[in-house]
Image (tube, rainbow, N blue to C red):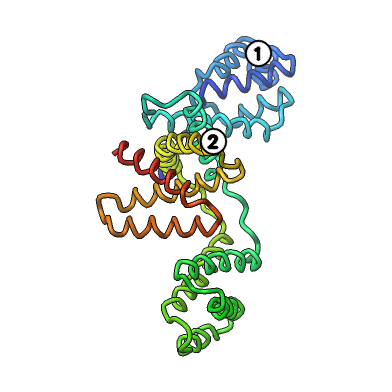
Amino acid sequence: MTKTNFIFTKEMGLLLKKFRMNAGLSQSEVGERIGFSKKSAYSQISHLENGLIKNPSLGNIILYLKACGAPFTTFFQKLSEIDFKIEHKNIMRQVEMPSGITTDLRQKVDRDTAKYVNKIRYPKTPFQRLDWERVKTKIDKKVKILLFNHELDENSKAPYFTFAKELILNYDTGQARAIFEKYLKTRSLNWRIISETRSIVYKTIRTEQKRLEKPKPLTKEKLQKMGIGFLRYRVKIEPIEAEVQKKLGELNVPIVHNQAYKDFVRECYSAFKKYYRKDPSLLTQRLAEIMKTWKRQGLTEEILEKVKEITIRAFTHQK
């Protein structure tokens, strides 16, 4: 196993100095409390606070904190914040900002990236057990979208919802296979939709089960890679969203709907990124599906078309 040295930085030294100043102690006083001789006490603490000792012992740092009456937890929490700021600066240096981006957008991208990195750095504590109400709500929403995309009338939808509910109730009972085969044999039902519904149920439950697993901490390299990827995405999508925001204002779209149109933009952008110049037919199909979904959510087709045009123009210009 490779030994990793503890590198003490100037920022960490300044943090220690703040604790000493708050305690009203001189450098010599702290040094003597730690156990240094009167001759070396001042120089030892001065070198430590100025980051000139690159790998001081953890024991001396703890003695320093004790001498100042400073809580260990506060010190290490502050260290974590310093480390996060350094990581964030390193990520921001990796991606060049477009020349035309405004100061406001630049600051927003910076804030969004910091929030994202902090979120993946400290993942939330997982649930202790599966939240079945959450599972049912997510499946119900996905099945509704599926049936809408298949253009079924209201009278024909009920059996598919019943099928989904039966699968959920019998997911762990061993009866799920028999239920699936029973509905497949029902002539009045579309076998493809039955299969797609089963897929939605299984994938949703498995995804929710994974949320119960204790998340593994990310390596520094992985954290930086994910942060840079997010930053590059935000740098490209942020100007598009700003232009869409302006257009929505011109069209007098209620503010409560703005986020929905921005979500529509992001889905369109993802489709372009995946299929543009690779498979035009799949791109057209995917865009049509996205349009259908958001029209069903109550957004206006005319405005969706205008927003899509902005996204297409911006994406092709970036390319």
Q: Amino acid at mark 1?
A: Gln
**Place of residue 99 in the rendered image (x, y in percent of width and height, measured from the top left):** 36, 24
Q: Quadrant of residue 175?
A: bottom right
With respect to residue 77, does 312 lie above or below?
Answer: below
The image quadrant where one finds the C terminus is top left
With respect to residue 193, does 281 lie above or below?
Answer: above
Instruction: Give 131 or 180, whichever is nearer the viewer.
Output: 180
Residue at screen point 62% across, 33% down: 76
Q: Amino acid at mark 2?
A: Gly
Instruction: Give 112 or 40, whichever is nearer the viewer.
Output: 112
With respect to residue 179, does 53 lie above or below?
Answer: above
**Place of residue 313 in the rendered image (x, y in percent of width and height, measured from the top left):** 34, 40
- Label ID, residue 165: none
Instruction: Bin the neighbour count of mark 2 within 10 Å (Cα to Cα): few under 14, some 14-19, many 20 and up.
Output: few
With respect to residue 309, does 125 lie above or below?
Answer: below
Q: Which residue is mark 2?
A: 249
User: Quick check: 10 left or right of 60?
Assistant: left
Which-is-in-front pick, marks 1 and 2? 2
Instruction: Give 63 or 7, whichever is nearer the viewer.
Output: 7
Which structural element holds mark 2?
Answer: helix
Residue at screen point 61% across, 44% down: 256
Q: Which residue is mark 1?
A: 27
Query: In this view, which residue lies farthest toward the top?
Result: 39
